[in-house]
Image (cartoon, rainbow, N blue to C red):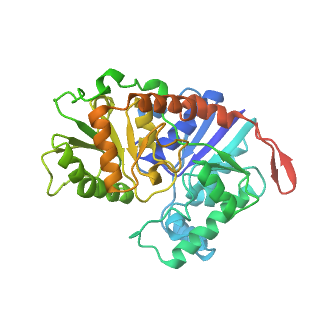
Amino acid sequence: MSDLYISAFAPTLGTGRALRTYMCIRALASLGPVDLAYVPHGADAPSPEYQAIEDLRFHPIRPSRGAHRLTTYASLCLRGVPQQWARGVSPEIAQVAERLAAAERRGRVIVGDTACAVAMLSWARRRPLIYNAHNIESSYRYPGHGESRLDRLAVLRTERRILRMAAESWMVSREDVAMARDLVPAARLRYVPNVVDVDAIRPAADASRAGAGDRGAAGTRRLLMVGDFHYPPNRHGLAFLVDEVLPRVWRELPDVRLTLAGRGLEPWPGQDERIAVEGFVEDLAALYATAGCVAVPLLQSGGSPLKFVEALAYGVPVVATPLAARGLEVRAGEHFLAGADADAFAAQVAGVLTDGAPAIAARGRELAEAEYSLQALATRIAAPVSYVTGGVTNSPV
């Protein structure tokens, strides 16, 4: 059997969405052959990481332009599909995907985003279709997003339609499972969390963070924040960290240095000399190795933050807001330290950078191995299930 994965994005890395897709496809390929049908949106060719996956075959989908695409867009909008999702749908997605789905010994058919889910809804009335959700989209909103009430209503209605039609939906957190169940009580759901390649991550040495003697490679206490800062919740969290948390930390520990890594930080006006902006870093291992603490200061978000999981895998103590931890199987005081407001967050950071937290770091790494590794993901999606579509029970494996 060969599974089919359909994506409206090129198979590359660089965002949280892209990493979830990549890890899911790696897990599927560890179980058997996979066909990946994709729109080359964002890149013309698969990245080297994808090309290195064994038993993965690529099928690019060349979307149409002009009147044909415009007709599809208009038709979807008239049916209540949100404009931002309708823009990503071309008629070729369904045409290529349905042809590939009809192949002999076809296994599961999985859509990896809302655009492909919308494109395949009609087909899903006849065959089992799996929807790999990245968030509960109808709740994944934050101030300043620029959406009207009608926009939000269109998202809610279409998301419910997808959840009802899908033979199974893969949700990133148990909280999202509960939220999806509230939206569609009859939805068929599976907990499929975001993961990282834990085996490929070498834990930072516990000894380098064992206590007050840990001052990093440059003789200073180092705090690290990693993320895509084009993403509004990360920028909002960064403002909270820099404007509210760090002044409190610096009153107690004036030598603390913050390192920021990720896209979207240029330019950085009014930068304090104690804040180092690295921009995008291909290999983060060196930054994690010199960090005494990782900050995840999210105040608005959804799903589960992959950089939180990555920090756990590196075995570095994490200080996070309760919201950042909400989608993960972590417990405050056991796997990370929680700071609900600026005073609490600053106190936790100062405590870790003064005394260390090796036991919490070690338990965080153990949790990453058990819950958020590629092997754990493969085990979760390997279990066969029976689907009921149109009153007929089907098995995709």
- x and y, in percent, of residue 238 in the image: 30, 54
Count of marks overlaid on the render: 0
Report whether residue 247 is seen: yes
Q: Quadrant of residue 143?
A: bottom left
Tell whether 270 sits left or right of 180: left
- Residue nearer the viewer, 99 or 374: 374
Residue 219's place in the image compared with 119, above or below, is above
Tell whether 388 sits left or right of 278: right
The residue sitting at 72% across, 60% down in the picture is 164
- x and y, in percent, of residue 154 in the image: 58, 72
Quarter of the figure that contains the C terminus: top right
- Residue nearer the viewer, 15 or 331: 331
The residue sitting at 31% across, 43% down in the picture is 349
Report whether residue 197 is seen: no
Tell whether 134 sits left or right of 188: left
- x and y, in percent, of residue 150 in the image: 54, 78
- Residue nearer the viewer, 86 or 245: 245
Residue 39's place in the image compared with 196, above or below, is below
Residue 307's place in the image compared with 218, above or below, is below
